[in-house]
Structures are given as C-alpha cells and as structure tokens.
Amino acid sequence: MMVHVGFLSPRRLKYVEADADSIPLPPYEGVDNAQCLLDIADIVVIDPVGTGFGRLLNEEYKAKFWGIEPDAEAILTFIQMWLARYNRWQSPKYMVGESYGCTRAATVAGMGSTVGSDRAYSVAFDGIIMIGNTVSTGKYFSDKKPVYPAVLAFPTLAATHWYHNHPSNQTVEEFVAEAKKFADTDYLLALYQGEALQGKARENIIKKVIYYTGVSREYLEKRGLEVDDVEFRAQVARKKGRYVSRLDGRITRPLIQPGLDEAQWGMRDDPAEGKYNPAFQSVLEGEVFPMLNIQWERNFVNSHSLYMNWNNDIKGRNTSMSLSTAMRRVPGMRTFFVNGWYDICTQIGILYYTLNHADLPKDRIFVKGYKAGHMAYLGEENIQEMTDDMYVFMTGGDPTKK
C-alpha cells in the first residue's frame, strides 16, 4: 500500500515534514503525482494472493501461495499472463520491490532466469529497484549474520543520532562514513575483545560510541559496549522525552514508562506507522481508487495479515543467491538498491555486508542512501530525488552519479 499511493500512483499523499508532531485527521490531502513514472513505463501493481482485493477462497491451498518460493511462482505466472495478454514480451521489464518486496523481487528474478518447482518461466528482467533492502546472505533477512549486529547497525544509529542531536557540523553522509569506518575497525575489534579490553583503550571506545550514537555511558557499561538497535530507539532522543521509529528514525512519539513500552510487552506502537498508515489507506481508497474507477465493496487488505502464515524456507539457497543467479544468467540485468539513512528496520549496514558477501557483479550494482527511512520516497524532496534517480537508472545510467 505504501509504495502504491506514496510513490507509484498518478495521485499520491501530500507529504508533511517527517518530524512534525502529527498529520491532521481526515480528510487527508492527496495531490496529483508529478513524479509518476507513467511517461516512461506502464506501471503494473501486483498484490499477492490474500492481499489487496485478492482472496484465497480455500485456505487449504495456502501452502501453494503463502511462502517465499510459492509466492514468487504465483507472481511469475501473473507476469507471464500479463505480457501475453498485452503483447509486451519484447518490452524492457523492471521490477520495483519495497521491504519484503525486495525478497520477492530477488526470488522472482532468480526463478525467472532458471526454473520454478515444475517448469521454466523464461522471464528476463532489465533491472530491479530494491527499496528498503531485505535481500540477505542468510536463510531469510531476520537470520543473524556472523558479525556483531551492533556493527552492522552502526551507520543507521549514527545517522539517527546526527538527525536528532546534531553532534557534528558534517553532512549526514560524512558523519555516517566516519562512523562506519570506526565500526568496521576499532568497534568490531573492541566487541571481539570483550572484557579483555581495559583501561585507556576501553575508555576511547566508550567515548567514540557515545559520540557516534548518542547513547548514555550507563547504558553502554550495562550492555558491555554493544548497542542494541531496539533499545537505541529509547536512548537516542531520551533527553527530549521522545522515542524514535523503527521504520523511520526521524519520526518520534513520546517516550513512555519503560514498563509499558513496546520493547517490554510487544505492543506495536511504531511512530511512523501511527503517523502515516491511516493517511495512506484513506488517500488510496478515497482518491486513487475513485480516480481509476475501481469500485469494490470488499476491503483492501495489507500484507500484515499473512505474516503468521508465511513460509520463509528457501530450498538450499538464500535470496542473495537468487539475485546472483539472475544477474549471472542475464548479463545485462542491473540492480539499484535504495536505502534510507534513518531506516532502523532494514539497516544500510546490513545491505553493505550483503553486497560484500553475495557474489554479485559490482559493475551492475548501484547503492544510494537517502535522507529518509524505510520508505525512502517519503517527503517532497525525497520523492523528487528518487524519481530523478529512477529515470536515470531505467534509461541505462548510473543513479549514484549526478
């Protein structure tokens, strides 16, 4: 839903500043999307079975649709049918995936270039745009990497600290680059050394971690110098009495009693979701659907309802291997990774790690950080920048160079 009405649709939500306390109650303001890509491409939005207006009529068959691989096969089947119906097999083909959609896009591209469970699909893609990356070298994105999570999270934590507390006159890109260099070297070694790190060397690490992340000395001492990204969200803006969002570290809500907080008892109270979900849903159903003459009495369902029923197994491989296979078998295929600096959900440090361990062709991989969170197009400046970069990428250029 977010990428539908936040980026791709010819009509979209009008954005307010990310750090504004709230957006107003309905009616929410929609605007004509001057950044819509319809002037260079047909836009085909696919809602997997069980989401959007689609329904699985008999849940006995959910195993045929609700999982990484069966979902990809269903998507490929739809793509084949659409290409045949509209005679577009010879046209360039690009996939845009956001969040789990990155996992989906990598798996679809891999199967499209080889075979599925029982047949070859033979669909080659010119390029993929990954927004909020979930392609992983592990079994699935949530699997732990063989590196301290605090090291992988460090660039994002530094960016979020920079945004809220302004510890440096550097740009966010400069501050993050410096923080990443520290995390990849001195901090990684310090965590490995553990209690063996003592005296002046330990004190230097503590000072630098506080400088780059904004957490308290008391917190660091208690955690053995390792910053947890969940606990960080209550630490970084604590002096302002605010708690930052997992999806977008720029967005905050009041910091409530620790005993009542979501980290303690599982309440899903993400500040970004609370800020934007009602507005996206309202503009989608109240403006976009009427404009497209979509009249349907059933509810438009988002994908959250499928999570508990989803099969995350991939037979003998992972999503980065699927992407690598596709790019090896389709020599002209290119991939553009879009990641927000303030995305604590899918951290850009994990993306860097994946790209360094996934056997991907570096000359056809493009990575860019945006001054945004998980939905990198949120904000009038961000959507314009991302649109400009998409035009460059889809016309064969390098979106990381201006």
Image (cartoon, rainbow, N blue to C red):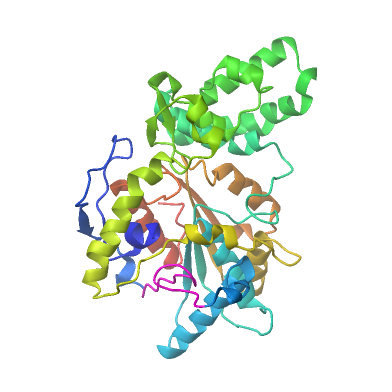
Count of numbered circles on the image: 0
**Residue found 69% across the figure and 65% down from its top:** 314
- Locate residue 108 relative to residue 42 in the image: left or right: right
Quadrant hosting residue 251: top left
Between 204 and 285, the one nearer to me in the picture? 285
Residue 15 position in % (x across, y down): 27, 48
Q: Quadrant of the N terminus?
A: bottom left
- Locate residue 326 relative to residue 34 in the image: left or right: right
**Residue found 40% across the figure and 27% down from its top:** 242
What secondary structure predominates along the stretch shown in magenta? loop
Residue 223 position in % (x across, y down): 66, 23
Residue 231 position in % (x across, y down): 55, 30
Residue 254 position in % (x across, y down): 38, 28
Q: Is residue 238 visible?
A: yes
Q: Is-magenta flag for residue 248?
A: no
- Locate residue 121 relative to residue 35 in the image: left or right: right
Between 320 and 239, the one nearer to me in the picture? 239
**Residue found 78% across the figure and 19% down from its top:** 195
Between 342 and 303, the one nearer to me in the picture? 303
**Residue found 46% across the figure and 39% down from its top:** 342
Q: Residue furthest top?
A: 199
Look at the image and give the residue range highlighted in magenta: 42-57
Q: Is residue 167 visible?
A: no
Between 288 and 392, the one nearer to me in the picture? 288
- Locate residue 213 relative to residue 186 in the image: left or right: left
Q: Is residue 386 above or below residue 83?
A: above
Q: Is residue 335 above or below residue 278?
A: below
